[in-house]
Image (cartoon, rainbow, N blue to C red):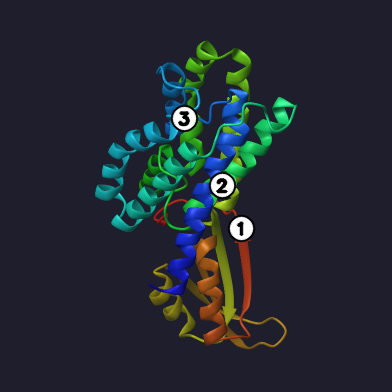
Amino acid sequence: MEKNEIYKYVELIFGSMLFAISINLFVTPNNINSGGIVGIAQLFDFYIPHRSSFDLTGIINGLLNIPLFILAIRNISKQFCAKTILSVIVQTCMLSILPKTQIPVMEDLLSNCLMGAILGGIGIGFCLRSSGCAGGMDILGVYFSKIKPGFSVGKLSILLNAILFSFCAFAWSLESSLYSIIYVSVMYFVCDRCHYQNINIAATIFTKEEKLKNEIMSRTGRGVTYWNGKGAYTEQDLYVLVTCLNKYEIRRLKKIIDEVDPNAFVILNEGSGITGGFEKRL
């Protein structure tokens, strides 16, 4: 296994643990619903009679993810599915082993909500950066981001959680439902900032090396458009290359440029809106 792939698995496990810790420390003790499949598992845990010292959330979360694993295998990739299964196993173990704090970590409910959202968003973001995900609705988010360009992984979960939070208002309180909405909104905002593959980059490259465009296409799998240009001051001929990729691929692009033409002038526009045949990648 390559060193980079080992790093991705470490990133995946760390993100999964961080997400589970945020649930047991900041979310569950304050009757905040985390949304998604974990949120559904929280409701089941609330309604199913069992010893209060034992948490069913992790086990139920694992069972509810099984149909989504099948979707991932058939429509995304086996590697993605393998990492997602590992993530859910880590979450299940952490949620079941870690004791739920009976007293909130902080007195203020909003502070607990925001801290849990930030840690949870970072955790899910790490899982997505590792070419996997934290399971649940994130699988649906990644699936739709692949078939529909410009789709944000976080937005789908916010949309589907509206129904879930309506049940939370009856199960716990309207206040808990409102804080759950705040929690999920902040969490997926943070997630989208950490999920580099969800951030588009438009790169404009000025180079004298004609072969650079071929190197970019062959080694990144991205298309390149180019023009013949001329420097206004030097009057020297050059090539103007334009390509679009995600933020995670920028490191590879810079490596190619450094190898072929270290003197190339590069402009990177982050967060560019891209429509058409742009392929969303994990």
Q: Report the residue at 69% width, 81% height from top.
A: 232
Mark closer to the chain start, 1 or 3: 3
Q: Secondary structure at mark 1?
A: strand
Q: Relative to residue 226, is residue 190 drawn left or right? A: right
Relative vertical location of residue 168 with respect to residue 91 in this rendering, above or below: above
What percent of the width, then of the height, locates residue 158?
51, 31
Q: Which residue is mark 1?
A: 270
Q: Quadrant of residue 69?
A: top left
The type of residue carrying mark 3 is Asp
Considering depth in this image, is 213 or 46 the residue closer to the camera? 46
* Residue 18 numbered mark, or none: 2
What percent of the width, then of the height, locates residue 146?
38, 49
The C terminus: image quadrant: bottom left
Disc 1 + disc 2, Cβ < 8 Å: no
Q: Report the residue at 45% width, 76% height from top.
A: 216
Q: Residues within 10 Å of mark 1 (few under 14, many from 20)?
A: some
Q: Which residue is mark 3?
A: 55
The type of residue carrying mark 1 is Glu
Q: Quadrant of residue 21?
A: top right
Tag in front: 1 or 2: 2
Considering depth in this image, is 243 or 139 the residue closer to the camera? 139
Is residue 142 at all visible to an observer of this figure? yes
Relative vertical location of residue 258 with respect to residue 278 in this rendering, above or below: below
Q: Residues within 10 Å of mark 3 (few under 14, many from 20)?
A: many
Q: How many marks?
A: 3
Q: Mark 1 to mark 3: distance in Å? A: 42 Å
What percent of the width, then of the height, locates residue 108?
75, 27
The N terminus: image quadrant: bottom left
The type of residue carrying mark 2 is Leu
Mark closer to the chain start, 2 or 3: 2
* Residue 236 numbered mark, or none: none
Tag in front: 2 or 3: 3
